[in-house]
Image: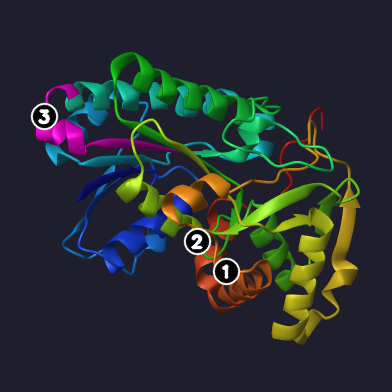
Amino acid sequence: MRYLVTGGAGFIGSAVIRRLISDSDHEVLNFDALTYAGNLSSLAEIADNERYQFVHGDIRNLALVRETISTWQPDLIMHFAAESHVDRSIDGPAAFIETNIIGTFNLLSAALEYWQALSPDGQELFRFQHISTDEVYGSLGETGLFTEKTPYSPNSPYSASKAASDHLVRAWGETYGLPVITTNCSNNYGPYQFPEKLIPLMIINGMEGKPLPVYGTGMNVRDWLYVDDHANGLIQVSEQATPGSTYNLGGNAEHTNLHVVESICKCLDRLSSDRAPHKQLIDFVTDRPGHDARYAIDCTKIKNDLGWAPTVSFEEGLERTVAWYLNNTDWWQEIRNRTYSGERLGKIGS
């Protein structure tokens, strides 16, 4: 099968591409704008494989999107390309509107033109798979889980832009018959994650002896999904899901942000004793505007339909992740020096 993966130099996209190339005979074209969070070094292990190709391109460039799809002739488009950090969306929402909404519209428009020109067999095979987030559902109270039927209620510019892109994908399926699939995932973590996100930021700050900033009281709850589990689930969806399907993928691992940071400290204490105890670095800071209280995903549908469930426990996944950042300082140090030094983002009026 020929995959066109947008945003394949990002965290989740690169995990999927590594798996597609290493564990199968699929062909993959990675279409990525290489914005600040795109990193081709995350694909170094498969970069020279004859079944992998890269195009430096932006989904906001409709002409290039059309040309790439027409030339590559994909059986499946897997759409990751997006601005994805809530804090950055607070500081500068325009980029999220342009990429996540206009870019997705461009991709859908080009995909529809391509799909309509295929043979009947080609149309039957083709899929447009859109990767989204549980943040489109808004915030949960102390109980309950997000399901595929949960109404959308986004609270940040980021989640609003992803909700809009989800709706566009659904509309292209319903209106034009484009064979679309959408997945919504919980918080991912693991190797190669850009260090603005909570877990890698805490690991690297802890390694450097810097403060570990925890928003508010640290009681906000997230469901954590190890990135390789997510990659396996997305590939399974691409191979088995029927057009029009939506699936939620979560880790069945709800934890408060404070518990996550304290768990990272314990891992660092075991694996790197230079600054133990790392817990003393925790620093409670002013909360993020519009900070959703709790996310939690019900994975029943994908388990029943496709047999997918997460296999890596949070404890095991976190241990692997901390060890990876300890052993791959060259990967993240380049980012620290060139792109993001660990400063706080998303503070209105400051």
Image quarter of residue 41: bottom left
- Ranked by sequence position, the earlier of labels 2 and 3 is 3
Quadrant (top left, top right, bottom left, bottom right) of the C terminus: top right
**How many residues crowd around disc 1 within 10 Å: few (fewer than 14), some, or many (20 or more)?**
some
Secondary structure beneath dot 1 equals: loop
Q: What residue type is labelled 1?
A: Val
Left or right: 105, with 294 as reference point: left
Q: What stretch is highlighted in magenta?
A: 116-131
Whole-percent x, y for residue 196 in the image: 64, 51
Left or right: 160, with 276 as reference point: left
Q: What residue type is labelled 2?
A: Asp
Where is mark 2, residue-wise?
Answer: 229
Whole-percent x, y for residue 302 in the image: 49, 48
* Camera sees residue 88: no
Secondary structure beneath dot 2 equals: helix
Residue at image location 64% in from the left, 46% down from the top:
297
**How many residues crowd around disc 3 within 10 Å: few (fewer than 14), some, or many (20 or more)?**
few
Whole-percent x, y for residue 71 in the image: 13, 37
Where is mark 1, residue-wise?
Answer: 312
Q: Does the magenta stretch include residue 121?
A: yes
